[in-house]
Structure formats: structure tokens, C-alpha cells
Amino acid sequence: LEGVKPINKLKPEFQGKEAAAAFRFKDRKLKKSETVNYTLVMGIDSGPGKDSRQRIMCTFSKLNSLIKIKKSLDETKKYWLNYLSKVDFDFKDRNFNNWLLWVKLQPTLRKLFGCSFLPHFDYGKGGRGWRDLWQDALTLTLNEPNKAKTLLLNSFKGIRVDGSNATIITKKGSFISDRNKISRVWSDHGIWPLLTLGLYINKTGDLAILNKNTAYFRDHLLARAKETDSNFCQKPACRSLGAGRDFLLRNNKGKIYEGSILEHLLVQHLTSFFNVGKHNTIRLENADWNDGLDMAAEEGESVTFSFMYAHNLNYICSFLAHLKKKTKKVSLMKELTLLLDQLNNPVDYNNFRAKQRRLEEYLKVSRNISGQKKEVKIDELIYDLERKSKHLSLWLRKYEWLKSGFFNGYYDNKGRRVEGVIKGKVRMGLASCVFAIMSGVADAEQIKKIWIAIKKYLQDKTSGGFRLNTNFGSSLLDLGRAYSFSYGDKENGAFFNHMVVMLAKALYCRGFIKEGFQALSSIYKMAIAPQAKIYPLIPEYFNNSGAGLYLYLTGSASWYIYTLVEEILGIQFILGDIVLTPKLMPRDFFKNNIQIKYAHAGATINLSYINPLKKRNSSGRINEKAFEIKSVFLEEKTILKTNNKYIIKKGDLVKLKKKELHLKIYLA
């Protein structure tokens, strides 16, 4: 604009804010119907000297005219629309459909740039964290399961034999101990690989992946980062000098040791089961999902993720039950059988010290493994894991349920319970509610009470969003730095979308459909509100003013798509078969049908849910009762119920030998 000068950047209100660059151009008067275009081409080349200049000029020559730029833009759009079409939703609402396009893109952006690439978030050093790796792979498993398999097999190489893991994976796919030379162990890291692998197995039917062998990560950290191997050299030049120098676990004869994927899963879950504090729940160590809970390494406990370890121990058994149809035994690391105590020398699970002693015994022998294997009967393995899962579930239900109507989630570094009524004030966290529900530990009556408490203490009455915790009113230096943030920011009471979408997933999968809808829809409503001031996607969190922070840097996107597919649309995959269990309500329909297109069994599946009439109750409001399936047609052929379920067998899809298949489901 004429006469407008650059703003004074030294104004006090700009202090601490992000910088922005701007360009000014000379005034130019345009005649009638005349136009002018300004093209800005930016890039970075890290190469040296003359070669760098040549590369820059070569790139510039491809974009040095408006015609070339438009062509490049069209090609870029075509590429990404094709990429995003692999799982394509059509809810018959343009705004929601377009928003979902960006949400689907978020995991890819994290894969390209890393969760911590940008300097305004985290450390700005690039790479992805352990948790990010597995949650981004949820979407890849739906889109491209063949590529997902390669990624999964490589990712298991990040697990240490003590049950902990490398925390960062580089863009080249290699693992490093940590980002900032700070030795840390997160107590929740063991649960994520199984959740992602489980989706892959059920999507593809590839149960054999459990028997695939891969290496373990080995670095200078021992005994879950409590000890350091001073003889281990981390410098790249040392990696070719012999045993233990290439970040791969070797046996006591210097040979690289490999174990099955199943063995890796067992290492993670068995060590965690025995790694308890004095309240007999799993130790918090340096933090869990909430990275801000980082000041209770000695006495802290994570009841929150104890729920999920109880769940996962049983979840492993569900795959073992299928595996034993093909083989009666599995081969496991000899030292690991110490933790299969029900098969040899049972531990009193009610005695936390007995658990700790058994873990210490294993950590001692696993420092220098023999490399020998031991065959274990699958029936006996299932028996052991089920005993552990049942014990932990009953313990949590008995000792961590609060009179306030929800579960406690943590113990601090002085061994004090964190949640409940503390000094006359209610302290409540969302995470403990989510995983108590998702794990199956909370029964139906407890879920009803938990939901009442969530609505009362954690739901914002203005936005409808759900906060991560109530205002504890203290910095809680015996728990973590999270509570030193201003209330409503980051991990202290913000509307943290990752946990909200998992709340929705948990409620849906336990049959609380109306409640699940409220949780999931709150994210979309806040994301499109004017005060969000953000691109059309799911930010990491919304602050007190409703502003969305940290763009694509969140695992929420994968969980959102995962919840849409598996829970709302009810497209459950069981060992390659499709089981239809929709949880659709009339309010999910913008018009009379919903469509989704996705790849499965070598074909593109075009699935439609048809609601012939939007049901409304007598008062005119949309009925909140979920639909039931009236009939199912595959390529115009009726699909009948099997064991009271609508199941489309993978083998039947393959026999049709078609590139495109159509599934129509009529609701009633």
C-alpha cells in the first residue's frame, strides 16, 4: 500500500514472538486489464562451491517462468492427491472432506521432516522419536501395508535386550540413543510397537511376521539406563573394531544375536511387568507419554500405562492363539525365560520386591547373553501371559479406583498419589481415564462414572473441548516440569488432541458411542473455529484462547484416521478378513450415504454406508441411537451373517480377481 512503511519490530509486544520476513517491491502502475506477477523461488543447497551453484541454477531454470511454475504446481497437486487417495473418505460434506485430506497428510509430513525438526518446537534437531515412529506407521499400515512391513521389521531393531529402546530414529532409518546425550527411559515406549504391529497383522493376515528374526539395539546404556558401559565406544570410527561397536547386540562369543519379533515384544512387556514401584504398578522412570512428567525417576509410578501393559499382555495371547494352529512351540532367548516365571519358578505378584528381584536377575544375565535359544510351548506361554495380565488388571481395579469416580494415574517422587481429592481440591488427569477405558480394565459402570467426571472436571463449557488435566495449582516438582507451564498450555491443562482422540477411540471401542462422538467431534469443531488461527489440520494442542499450536507435529492424525476407519465406520480387520461393526449414528451423516475407498487384498474396495432416511426423534432432534446393519452386498451379491457378524473373507475377495470391488451396506 502506498505510504506504508515497514513496521517497528522493536515494539514490546513483539518480544518473544516468531520472526517473519517480508519483501517490498517498487511501485508499479498498471493499465486497465494489465497484470503483473511476482515469483519467489527459494531453496537450500548444502553442497560446496561450483557444483552447488550448478545445482541451484539447474533447479531455477525449471521454475523461471510463470508457465513452468504453473506446470510444476499442477504436477505437485496431482502427485499428492493421488498419494492421499489410497484411503479416501467422502462424508458428503466438502469442508469436512477437505479437512480430512490434510489430516491424512500429517503423518507423511512428520516422516519427511521429523517431529522435532522446527526450531520453535522441541529441539529443532530433526529425526523422529520412538513414539512418533510407531504411531505414524498406523496410517502407513492402512495405506501401504507392504511398505509398512519393511518399516516395522527395521523399527524393532531399536529395542534393547533390557526392554528399553533407542529414542530417536534418523531420516536414514538408523537408531541413536538419544537426541541430546541425556540418558532417558520412557515407561510407555513398550506398548506402541504391539498396537501398530497388531493393526498390520490384522490388515494383512501376515501372522508369520511374528517369527521373523531381527537384531537388538546395543549402546553404552545398560539396565534401563541405570548403568553405563564405559568400554563401549559410540564414535562412528569405532563401529568396525569388533563386538558391541556397531550398535547391534552380540552374544558372549561376539556374534550378532537375532530374535523373533515375538521375542522382542515379550522382552518389552515382561521387563515392564516386573519393573514396579512400591505400589506394585509400573515405574514411571524418566517419563511416559506425557514427556513433562520427568522428575520422578526414583519413586514415581505410571498407573496410566500399567493399564495398557495389562491390555497388551492379553493382546499378545490373541495372536498366539492363532499362531499355535500352525506350530505348538516358539524359540526364545534362553535368558528371557527367567521372566516366564509361571513355567519355572513362580513369583508372588502381590509382592513388589519379589518382582523387582526377578527383574534384577534378568538384567544381570542379559548383559552378556549366551545366544542360546529355548523352546517354549505356546499354550504355556499363553498361560504365563494371561496370569500376568489378569493380576495387573485386578490389582489396578482394586487399588487405584478412587471414590471421586475415576482412576488415579500416577505416584510422584515421594511415593504420593497424584490424583483424587488432594487437600480438598480435585486433581484429575485425562490420560488415566483414557487408558483405563481402552485397556478394558474399567468395567461398564466405572466408565459411566469416569465420563461424568470428565464432563464435570475436564470439559470446557465454552469450546466443548477436553483438557488434559484439572488445574493442580502447584508446580509439582516431585512429578515433572509439565506443571510449571502456565495452565492451559502444553502438557498442563491444554486441549491436547492426541489424548482426546484416544479418549474417543477408547469410548467407541467399549460401546460408548454417543460419548465417543462428543470427544472426536470436539477436535474438528475447535480446529475450524476462527480462534484456532491454524491450517486445516489437527494441531498438537489448543491453548486457553482456542489457538492451535504446533501444526502437524502430533500423533493425533494417525489415531483420528484409525478411529474413523475401525470404530465409526466399523471396518475391522481380523487376520486379513473384514468384519463390519459400524458405530454410526444419524448425526454422522451429512447426507444419506458415506463412502470410503481403500486398498485391501490386492483390490480397491469402494464401501458405501447407506442411510435411507435420517432418523429423528419426536422432538425433532437427531436420534442418538446407533444404526444396525440391515443388509450387505458385495458386487451385488448378498453377504449373510456368520456367527452373528458380517464377515468378508480375504480369500473370497482374492477369488473375485477384480481390481475394484464394491461393498454396499444398508442401515436400519
Image (cartoon, rainbow, N blue to C red):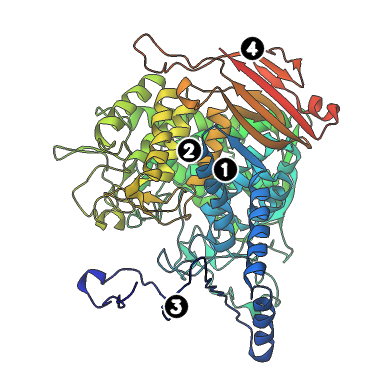
Q: Nearer the viewer, residue 185 or 647?
A: 647
- Assign a secondary structure to mark 3: loop
Q: Earlier in the sequence, mark 3 or mark 2?
A: 3
To which residue does mark 1 refer?
A: 339
- Give amino acid for label 2: Met
At 35% from the left and 55% from the top, the residue drawn is 292
Type of the residue with mark 4: Asn
Q: CA distance from mark 3 to mark 2?
A: 64 Å
Q: Nearer the viewer, mark 4 or mark 3?
A: 3
Point out the tag, 4 or 3, that comes first from the N-terminus.
Answer: 3
- Please indicate, yes or no, whether residue 183 appears anywhere in the rendered image: yes
Residue 88 appears at what percent x and percent y? Answer: 63, 39
Note whether 644 is above or below 351 in the view shown. above
Question: In the rendered structure, which disc, 1 or 4, sits on the residue that comes first in sequence?
Answer: 1
Q: CA distance from mark 2 to mark 4?
A: 29 Å
Q: With 138 as the anchor, is 443 left or right in this view?
A: left
Disc 1 residue type (three-letter):
Leu
Residue 644: which numbered mark, if any? 4
Pick out the residue farthest to the front: 32
* Residue at 35% from the left image edge and 22% from the top image edge: 448
Left or right: residue 100 versus residue 429 is right
- Where residue 320 sits in the image (x, y, percent)? 67, 32
Select label 1 or label 3 by which is in front.
3
Q: Which residue is mark 2?
A: 308
- Which of the two discs, 1 and 4, sits closer to the camera? 4
> In this rendering, is residue 358 above or below 166?
above
Q: Which residue is mark 3?
A: 28
Disc 1 element:
helix
Tell which circle, 2 or 4, labels the residue nearer the N-terminal end: 2
* Mark pair 1, 4: CA separation: 39 Å
| Callout 2 crowding tier (Cα within 10 Å): few <14, some 14–19, many ≥20 | many
Compared across the picture, whether 79 is left or right of 119 comes to right
